[in-house]
Amino acid sequence: MIHQLTRFIYRFLITSFFFVNIVTAEITLNSRKISYDPNNGIITASGDVIVIQTFEDGKVRELHAEKIEYNKKLKEIKLIGSPMIKETSGEIIYAQSAKLDSEFENAIVTVLTIILKDKSKVKAQKADKKKAIFTFENATYSPCKENDCSLPLWDLTAEKVTYDKEKQQFIYKNAKLRLKGVPVFFTPYFSHPSPEVKRKTGFLTPIFRNLTDIGFFTGFPFYVTLGSDKDLTVTPFLHSKRRRLASADYRQKFYCGNFDVSASCLSKAKNDKAQIQDKRTRWHIDSVVQSQNLDNKRFIVRINRSSDTTYKNVYPVDLVHRTDMLLRERYNDSKIVCEFYDTRYFLTTESHIYQTANRDTAPKVYPHIIFNCKRENFLHGELSFDNDTVYLTRKKEKSTMFAEDFFRATNKVSWQKTANFSPVVFDVNSSIRTDIYNVSETVEATKSKNRVFPVFENQVSAFVPFISEIKTFKQTSIWGPKMALSSVETRKKRSNFEQNEDSLFDTFSDLNLHSLNRVGYDSVETGERVSVGFENSIYNSKRRWFNAFLGQSRSIGKRQKFKFAGRNSTVGRLVLKPVDNLSFRMRFVGVPFVEKSQLFESGVNAGYKNVSCGVGYMYDKKIGHIQENGISQLGFTVGIKLTEFWSVSGAKILNMKKKNGKRALAHGATLAYRDECLEFSVGMCNTKFRDGDIKPRTTVIVSLVLRNIGNIITPTTGYGYSASVGEVE
């Protein structure tokens, strides 16, 4: 008798109203009393009935009830006395009573409450099951907290909710969105896929924008599932100036790769008052094919083009590939990349076709080949071979730094040996490098051909690491000095040969103080150079909370003394984070007020109780070829938590260069509310940045997010902004 009851309870648990999947499990039943009524054919377990289901992976599901009855004549089972089920995934299900047939095709549950894993609640006065169709009457959903004397901040109610298990779809009838019990939105019908469905055809969250010089437009993304491995999103826009705008994105995944393409088109402006640059058709296309699951190889093919380089930053048309490039040079890069690698070598071949604001100087690079191979235990050291070959062309020259036709091939053979003579660690690096150039049509060197330059590079460095324990604070300190002596020899003509390509590199990084060639890959400083530095790091049980480095690299040869005088500079770095809510960072090239400063960066982030703030300063004399005048900016951020749920924050970026535009680059403030069921924020910012048709704008952003339902974000005018003063990792 007990076995028969247990068998039916087990069937109830694994195929019940609560949508539990059929799995192999072990079940036990405990109760105060087990009885059998032969006249009515009823088996009863009563008195604190507990059914425990243990799965093979160790997870447990529990059923608690006052009484469980099985009627053999009617072939139905009843759960009586507030049954409760604890699911393995964390959900808890309460009911007043439940009744279902022995085949579990039909079921009725009264006063149902489901507490989901994220503490959200689903309630229904009555729930029916007829085969694969589940019906909830007077259903309510809310993730908000509630008690006996208050209503949830918001909830979603429906007169009737139908769930089709085969179609995996929920259908709502007469649904209402309520705030503190007051209806604010009503719809007679809507549907959405069930939680187990990852993708489903339907509309996504709409897009709202209103830009002062472009007008108001709203988009309605429509998502289409084309199969388990591909989908399509089409977004038509409504525009206040009657311009037709639409975008589309197609994605497909293969076993060995994936394909993604997005495109958009904006029709011509019919309003005579529209800007000149908006009186043409604007468009973009961005497609990427990337390999996956391939052994020792990788391929990328990207086609990225647009009518102009600012179009995607003004209009929200590129929902997949879009990145914020507010302070960077805007360009599109179409490329093909092939990589092959092993434990002993790697080979990369690239081809790039760039699109920039100035089409006459947009470069094409085909090919760019990088090859490296290593051989260990060669003369008790490591032997490596490096090749870097690049061919670049453009329609028209811009300056001596931008050749119309440029070819360079560099081959380098290096031998490196590390020896440990305690307490000193020596590192010896010797290399022979050959540079082959072919440059034509530059201002300084008209049609120069086939220059071959041998370069001999040698370096010996010594590092003395010391490890000490600070027992009082249970911390470890690693410190020590490092010195490097390098020598570079080449022909005089090679050392005077300017680089003629668009490669950008960080000449003064504090990480390359001891490198063989501190002036960049395509320019060579001949002679001898000595570099000395000292570093100290302190670790505790959580992290490295202190790091300091100070070093200087100085040319000791007389050749090219004036040409590379700026390379004789002091480099420093300081990172300090003693506690979680306080951090300080600083990096400089050239000691301020002592020698000519090339770069200085510093920032402080701090927090105390409900207040957090940050200050950061950045000075860079020259950032590659993008901003030849450099930058000098000061940023402030502050955040205050007013109450448990309310907070306010603000930020400001100042331009410290007197001859470089407006003093204030961006500033703004945001008021936000956040709890377990709702996020709301309203903010306003003003920017002074200009780039093509991106102009200074004032922006008001209103954001409303209902947890687990969706969000509405409405920037009413202009562009958003971001300001950062840095954080120590």
Image (cartoon, rainbow, N blue to C red):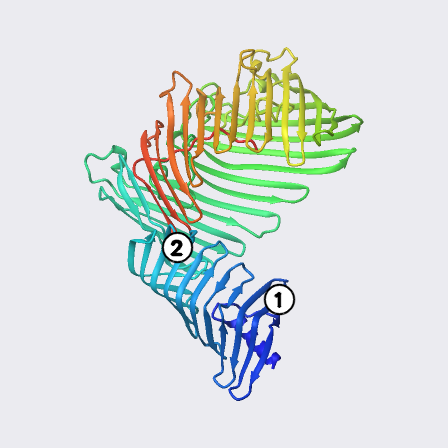
Q: Which of 636 and 715 is in front in this view?
A: 636
Q: For the N terminus, which image quadrant?
A: bottom right
Which residue is drawn at the image coordinates 58% and 17% (left, top)? 567
Assign the C terminus to one quadrant of the image: top right
Whether residue 693 is visible: no
Would you say the residues marked 2 and 1 are in contact, meaning their CB atoms lie under 8 Å apart? Answer: no
Residue 328 position, x and y percent, is 43, 31
Question: How many C-alpha atoms fall within 10 Å of the one at disc 1: few (<14), some, or many (≥20)?
Answer: some
Cα separation between marks 2 and 1: 42 Å
Please provide percent x and percent y for residue 419: 78, 29
151 left or right, relative to 581: left
Question: What residue does disc 2 label?
Answer: 232
Name the side, left or right, on which 257 lies relative to 356. Answer: right
Horizontal and vertical percent position of residue 225: 41, 59
Instruction: Judge whether residue 233 can be spotted in this image.
Output: yes
Which residue is identified by label 1?
Answer: 54
Q: In this view, does 532 lie to the left or right of 132?
A: right
Of 697 and 126, nearer the camera is 126
Q: Residue at position x 80%, y 27% from top? A: 422
Q: How crowded is mark 2: few (under 14 residues within 10 Å), some or many (20 or more)?
A: some
Above or below, comparing residue 197 to residue 205 in the picture? below
Q: Quadrant of residue 635?
A: top left
Q: Which amino acid does label 2 sit on?
A: Leu
Tag 2, which secondary structure? strand
- Amino acid, disc 1: Thr
Residue 338 is drawn in which quadrant?
top right
